[in-house]
Amino acid sequence: MLHDRVHDVIYNAVTQAVASVSHLDSECSEADMAKRIVKQINKAASDASLLTMRWEQACQEFVQKAMHGYSASCGDAVWFYDIDLVPALAGAAMEIVNASGQACNPHGVWEVCQMEYEDKLDRMMLDKALWEVVGSFFTEDKVRGKVFNALSKAYWPALDDALNDGNLHRDILYGLDPNTDLKRVEAFTRRWIDDSISRAWAAIEQSPVELTETLVQDLLKELIAPFGVEHPFSCLPGALTERLGRPPPDWAFIRPCVNELFRSWNGEVVAAPNKKRRRGGGGG
C-alpha cells in the first residue's frame, strides 16, 4: 500500500539523517528524534489531495505541510538547521507522484523538494535572526514585536524592488558584473531600512530607546551578521549576495546610507508636523 511504502521511505531516510546530527543533542536519543520527524513528514504525506495535483504542485504542497509540522515540533532543537531532510522529503514525494499516475523525472522531484525545503529553512532562519537582533536593541515585548514585524513586512518588497532593476534578463543569461551586484545590495538595504523604520516609527518613538543614526547603523551591522561573523548566515538576501559575498559588518555604505535616510525622514517631518522629528546625532 502507498501509506506503507511512503512510511518506509521516510523512516529509512530520516534514520540516516538523524545519525549524522545526533551528536549535537545529548538530551534526545536518535530513536526519539527520528520518531518526532517521521511523524510530521508522514502526516503531511497522508493528505489524499496531493494525488490530485500536478506533480510540481504536489511536491511543493507536501514539503510546505511537512515543514509546518516539523518546525512546530522540532523548531527549538539544536540540530533543526543542520539535519538534511531532502532525501526523506524527495523519496516520499516520488512515491506520491508515482501513485498519482504521472510520469516525471525523479531528478525534477528532488529539485523541487530541495528548493522548497531550503526556502522554508531560509525564511525560518531569517525570522529567528530578525527576532534575536531586534531583541538586542528593544527589550520591551510590544516594541520588539512591532519592529520585528516591520522588518519582516518590508523585506520582500525591498527584494522585489532590488531585483526589478531592468537587469533580470541579463542576470539570467549572463550574470551581472560586481558593480551591478553591489548596486542591487545597496538598493535593497536602503529600501528595507527606510520602509522598516517608517513602519516601526510610532512604536520606537513611544519606547525608551532613542532613535538615532548610531542605533540604526548598529542595527544594520547586526543584521548583516546576526549570529556573528563566524556564522555564514546574513539577513541580506542570498539572491543578491551570492556572487559578491556578505558585506563586512563595517561596510562603508552603512554610514552614508543611514545619514541620507535620516535627512529624508527629517524632511518628511517638516511636512508632517503631527509627527516627532527623528534625531540624527550620534552617528555622524
Image: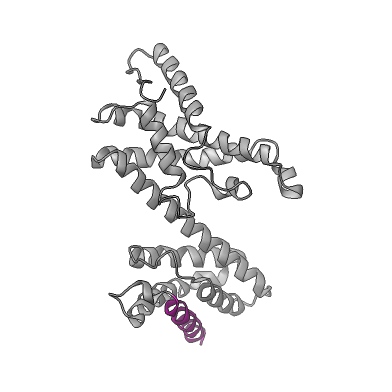
Of residue 151 and residue 236, the one placed in the foreground of this image is: 236
Horizontally, residue 284 falls left or right of residue 140, namely: right
Question: Where does the image place residue 31, in percent across and percent down from the top left?
Answer: 35, 83
Horizontally, residue 200 falls left or right of residue 84, namely: left
Q: Does the magenta stretch include residue 8?
A: yes
**Residue lying at 33% horizontally and 72% vertically, measured from the top left:** 25
Horizontally, residue 87 falls left or right of residue 169, namely: left
Question: Where does the image place residue 197, in percent across and percent down from the top left?
Answer: 40, 31
Question: Where does the image place residue 93, in percent across and percent down from the top left?
Answer: 55, 74
Q: Name the quadrant containing residue 211.
A: top left
Of residue 106 and residue 194, the one placed in the foreground of this image is: 194
Asked if residue 113 is positioned above or below residue 18 in the image, the reply reads above
- Principal secondary structure, stretch drawn in magenta: helix
Colouring of the image: one colour
Q: Name the quadrant containing residue 115.
A: bottom right
Q: Is residue 11 magenta?
A: yes
Of residue 143 and residue 224, the one placed in the foreground of this image is: 224
**Residue lying at 52% horizontally and 57% vertically, measured from the top left:** 119
Picture quarter with the C terminus = top left
Asked if residue 107 is positioned above or below residue 154 in the image, the reply reads below
Question: Where does the image place residue 249, in percent across and percent down from the top left?
Answer: 47, 41
Find the magenta span and give its range: 1-20
Asked if residue 216 is positioned above or below residue 83 in the image, the reply reads above
**Residue lying at 43% horizontally and 17% vertically, measured from the top left:** 268
**Residue lying at 61% horizontally and 65% vertically, measured from the top left:** 56
